[in-house]
Image (cartoon, helix red, strand yellow):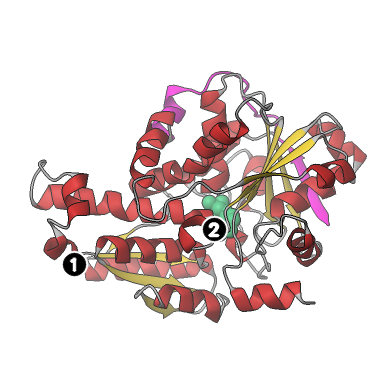
Amino acid sequence: MLTEHFHNTQKDTGHYSNDLRYVLSLQNTIAAFEEIKTWEGYAKTPLHSLDSMASDIGVKNIYYKDESSRFGLGSFKALGGTYGVLKFIHHALKKEIGDEVSMKDIHAGKYSEQISKYTVTTATDGNHGRSVAFGAKLFGCKCQIYIHSEVSSGRQKAMEDLEATVNRVSGNYDESLQICIEDAGKNNWYVISDTSYEGYTKYPRYIMAGYNVMAEEIIDQIKDRPLPTHVFLQGGVGSFPGAICGYFWEKFPGNNIKFVVVESEYAPCLIRSAQNNQMTSVNIKQETMMAGLSCGEPSLLGWEILKSGADDFITINDSSIPGLMRLLAENNLKIEAGESSVAGLAGLIESMEDQKIAKAMGLNKESIVLLFGTEGATDPDIYRSIISE
Ligand SMILES: Cc1ncc(COP(=O)(O)O)c(C=O)c1O
């Protein structure tokens, strides 16, 4: 059920500014793409066309970017944290050894001894931590992960399987991030976070550029079909929706595509920020089943883009999530979609069910909607139990 809607009167239909280019630019995205596509296991993820679902919902077409197979990690997050770890290693080696350190030499194993002494760390609901752990394993450094009390044991195991040390702490995501930052300071570890805050923006910027590999692939996959008129983006801290919104805005000046940010009603930090016209944190009192969206503090950089790039903000509750996961699993394409994955689809369906909201968003039978299936079965036990209900 859609529980709240806010239309953003601060939407800017002008050009993507130089200030925003400093946050994230197409140039950063292209650099990330050039690097990431050289990694072993890189493969473009599918862009499905959900034709019959689109006609049931009452729009012209739905493009669904299916991230369930990304690098075998099961979510788009594999593009961000892994790239963040590599950029950190590159910068740390340059500082230690000198400017001659090249990516090529890092990949060739020339600095493996130095790299093995570095430790990266992050707090996570699961997916980002898995990506950082994957990066640490791939490039040869150590990894310390912080998870909060509600993160599932399946997600914990996935990170331990990648040789990360996983520290479970009490409290919610935001509290686990605080402990992670404190421990990093004490131990000389480096935080590779997917969220940014005052004084910490360097690596989240690379992580957002990594996410936009999806956007680069989509442009190629759409080919001569029409561009989307609407993009539904599920938000946690807002790095993912900010990155995608910024990409399309810079690439197609005028910002005519409509961006709808979808959050859980239990973690509405982006809609609150839009309503207050300033970054606003919320205290998470209850955990949504959409674990990846359970974040109470917006990312500084994500918010910078969304505050003038997004058209609408909505919140949804969990009620439609299991049914939509089953609907996609039973579709002829047999799409594996995890709990956070179907939030965009839920947001679209629930917006279309309310004529006033659909009208405010300009959604109608001519609309072409881009959705992101941001994760697959990232916790296989939870996924199986939902699908077999
Ligand atoms: C599967 C999934 N979808 C969406 C998001 C939201 O991304 P962000 O926190 O950058 O807004 C997350 C975040 O962890 C996620 O794991």
Quadrant of the rendered image holding ligand 1: bottom right
Q: Residue at x 16, y 62 (%)?
A: 112
Q: Residue at x 65, y 57 (%)?
A: 341
The amino acid sitting under disc 2 is: Ser
**Residue 192 locus on image (x, y percent):** 35, 57
**Residue 328 locus on image (x, y percent):** 75, 58
Q: Is residue 9 magenta?
A: yes
Q: Check disc 2 and report the residue beneath it.
A: 69
Q: Give 171 or 226, whichever is nearer the viewer.
A: 226
Q: Residue at x 45, y 44 (%)?
A: 208
Q: Secondary structure at mark 2?
A: loop
The amino acid sitting under disc 1 is: Ser
Disc sitting over residue 116 in the figure: 1
Q: Which residues are magenta?
A: 1-23
Q: Give 266 or 323, whichever is nearer the viewer.
A: 323
Instruction: Please report contact status of discs 1 and 2: CB closer than 8 Å, yes or no.
Output: no
Q: Is residue 118 magenta?
A: no
Q: Give 312 or 381, whichever is nearer the viewer.
A: 381
The answer to whether residue 213 shows anywhere in this view is yes
Q: Residue at x 56, y 32 (%)?
A: 219
Q: Quadrant of residue 389?
A: bottom right
Question: Quick check: 257 left or right of 279?
Answer: right
Residue 4 vertical position relative to residue 260 in the rendered view, above or below: below
* Among the two numbered marks 1 and 2 on one chain, the one whose residue lies closer to the N terminus: 2
Disc sitting over residue 170 in the figure: none
